[in-house]
Image (cartoon, coloured by chain):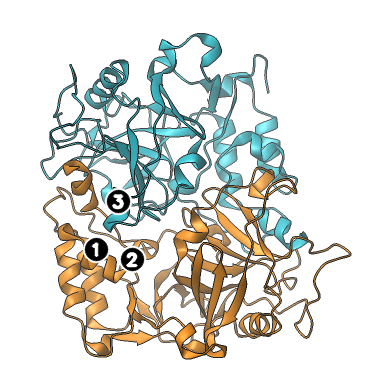
Chain colours: A orange, B cyan
Amino acid sequence: MRSGVALLAGLSMMSGFALAATPHAATMQEILAATRASDWRALDDDNTLLMDLPGGRVVIELAPQFAPAHVANIKTLVRAHYFDGLAITRVQDNFVTQWGDPHAGEADARSLGDASPTLPPEFTRRSSGLAFTALPDRDAYAAQTGFVDSLPAARDSRLGEAWLTHCYGMVGAGRDNDPQSGSGKELYVVIGQAPRQLDRNIALVGRVVQGMELLASLPRGSAAMGFYTDAESKPPITRIRIAADLPDREREHLEVLRTDTPSFAALVASRRNRRDAWYVAPAGHIDVCNVPLPVRPVARTGH
Amino acid sequence: MRSGVALLAGLSMMSGFALAATPHAATMQEILAATRASDWRALDDDNTLLMDLPGGRVVIELAPQFAPAHVANIKTLVRAHYFDGLAITRVQDNFVTQWGDPHAGEADARSLGDASPTLPPEFTRRSSGLAFTALPDRDAYAAQTGFVDSLPAARDSRLGEAWLTHCYGMVGAGRDNDPQSGSGKELYVVIGQAPRQLDRNIALVGRVVQGMELLASLPRGSAAMGFYTDAESKPPITRIRIAADLPDREREHLEVLRTDTPSFAALVASRRNRRDAWYVAPAGHIDVCNVPLPVRPVARTGH
C-alpha cells in the first residue's frame, strides 16, 4: 500500500481531525495541533440544519449574512417539518445533489405553509460591512476571493459586491428562470468541480460541514441531468431540524477553524506550497475552493 | 420540479448526448447538433482501457503522448491480467478513487510480471511538438491551459513544458515519495474539486470518458484518507482489458469531440458566457476543468 499512502501526501483534507491521523501531512497537522481554543468557532445552533438520512446525518451551517431572506424561509419550512419524509430527487455526477418535494409543481405538492413561494434574489450582497479575509492568490472567475466566517467567498470592490462561491459542499436554493422564484423548498449541494459559473446567478445559503460523503456518494440519477426516474427509489429524507430546536444531546457539537486567524493564514500557506516529502513542485498557488476548512468536535479546552 | 429543472440550465455537462436530452441547454445542444463527423475522433482502441466492475464498465482513454512509459507499463500489466480480481482500495470524498492490489507491499502481493516496478517521472513533457489548443482564459495555477487531443492540459512557454491537468475524471498513477516509484500498478481518478496542486508532481495517464459515475458514487472508505478497512468490502474489479484485445462486439464504440475544431471553440464560448434564459450574470470566463468534453457513440454518419 506504500504508493497509495504516499499519494495521500498530496491530499487536501476536508477535516481537521482526519488530518490528525495523517502521518504524511505533518505540516498541516502541526498547525492544527498548535491552534488555540480561540482559533475555533462553534457552529451557531440557531443557523445549523441537521439533515437526517437513513445512512446518517448531514450538518449544514446556514449563511444569513449572505442570504437572510432565504435562511429565514428555510427555517420556516424546517420548523413546519416541510422536508420530513421528502427525498433526494436528483444526483448529477460532477455537479449537484438536490432535494425537495418529488411532487413539487404537481397537484399533490406539499404545502409551503407560512413560507414564501418566492424570495428576493440574494445572489450577491454589498461588500461593505463584511469581514472579508482575502486570499492573495489570483482567482480566474472573481476579482478577489477569500473567506467570510469560514465560508468561501468572492468580492469585487469595483461593484462593491461580495458573494459566496460555488465550492464543493456549498448549499444553494434552486430556482426557476425568474430570479425571484427561489424559495429554499428545493436545495442543492455541489458534489463535483466547482461550478463557478453559477456564482452571482443563484442564492447560496450555507455549506455542509459534516456528512458531505452521504450526499456525494449517492447513485447518480438516470434521467436527464441526474434526476431520478419514478422507477428509481429516491433516497428519503428522514427529517431536517434546526439544531437549536433539539435537546442538547441530539445536536452536533462541532466547531470550525476561524478564517480570520493567524492559524488559518498559516494553514493556507502550508497548502499553497506543500512541503511534504512527497512533493517535487509546490504549486505556489491555491484556489479558494481547494482551501481546507477544518471542522472538529467542540473542544472544551484548547486543542 | 420546475425550479429543479430550471437549476439544470446552469449545468456543465460531461456528456454530449446527455445534453441532447437537455431542453434548457439549447445553445450547446445546437452546437453539438451542428457538428460534422470530422469534428469527432473515435477512441484509439489500442490505448483505451475497459474496466469492468460488477456495476458496469468504465472506459479510460490513455495518454501516451504525455506518459509513454507509464502507458506502456499499464498495458503490460493489463495484458498479463494483473488487475483482474483486484479491487478499489480507497475512495476519499472530494479527492480520489484509487485501485490496485489490496496486498501491495505485502508478502502475498501480486507479481508485476514483466512490468517495471519503477518508471521515469512523466510529470511534464516538452511542449514543443505538441498540438496545443490554448484557452484565452487565465488560469490560476498555470501560465496557460488548453487541450491536447481532447484532454485538459497546461503549458508554460518559459519552462518549455506541458502537462495534463488534474481535472475531474483524470486518471493518474500513484507513487511513493520517490518520484520514480510510480509503476501504474496503482491508479487513481479525480472525483472532486480539481486537485491542481498535484499537477507536475505525479503522472497523469489518461481520462475516464464513460462510466465516471461508477467510480465517483462508491462509498467513501472509513480509514484515514479514504482507505477501506479490512472489515469493509472493497469494490472488486472484474477485469481490465485493452479495447483492441477484445472482439469488436465487446468494445465500446465511442468518439470524443475534437478540441482543435471550430465546433469545440464555439462550445467553449457558449459555456464561457451562458446565454440560457436562466442566467442573469454570465461568468465571462471558464476554467479548463469546467469545459465539457463531449463523448458520443460512434456515428457512422454525421451527427
The amino acid type found where label 1 is placed reads Arg
- Residue drawn at the location 70% of the way across and 37% of the way down: B20
What residue is shown with label 1?
A: A271
What residue is shown with label 2?
A: A291
Secondary-structure class at tag 1: helix
| Residue neighbourhood size for the residue with mark 3, other residues' Cα within 10 Å, grouped as few (<14), some (14–19), many (≥20) | some
| Residue neighbourhood size for the residue with mark 2, other residues' Cα within 10 Å, grouped as few (<14), some (14–19), many (≥20) | many
User: Residue A77: in sight, yes or no?
Assistant: yes
Q: Are marks 2 and 1 on the same chain?
A: yes
* Image-based side of B95 in relation to A141, left or right: left
The amino acid type found where label 3 is placed reads Thr
User: Residue A141: in sight, yes or no?
Assistant: no
* Image-based side of B22 in relation to A289, left or right: right
Question: CB atoms at circles 1 and 3 under 8 Å apart?
Answer: no
Question: CB atoms at circles 2 and 1 under 8 Å apart?
Answer: yes
Q: Which mark is residue B229?
A: 3
- Residue drawn at the location 85% of the way across and 62% of the way down: A106
Query: Mark 3 belongs to which subunit?
Result: B
Numbered disc in front, either 1 or 3: 3
Numbered disc in front, either 3 or 2: 3
Q: CA distance from mark 2 to mark 1?
A: 7 Å
Q: Residue furthest front?
A: B231
Quadrant (top left/top right/bottom left/bottom right) for the C terminus of chain B: top right
Q: CA distance from mark 1 to mark 3?
A: 27 Å
Q: Are marks 1 and 3 on the same chain?
A: no
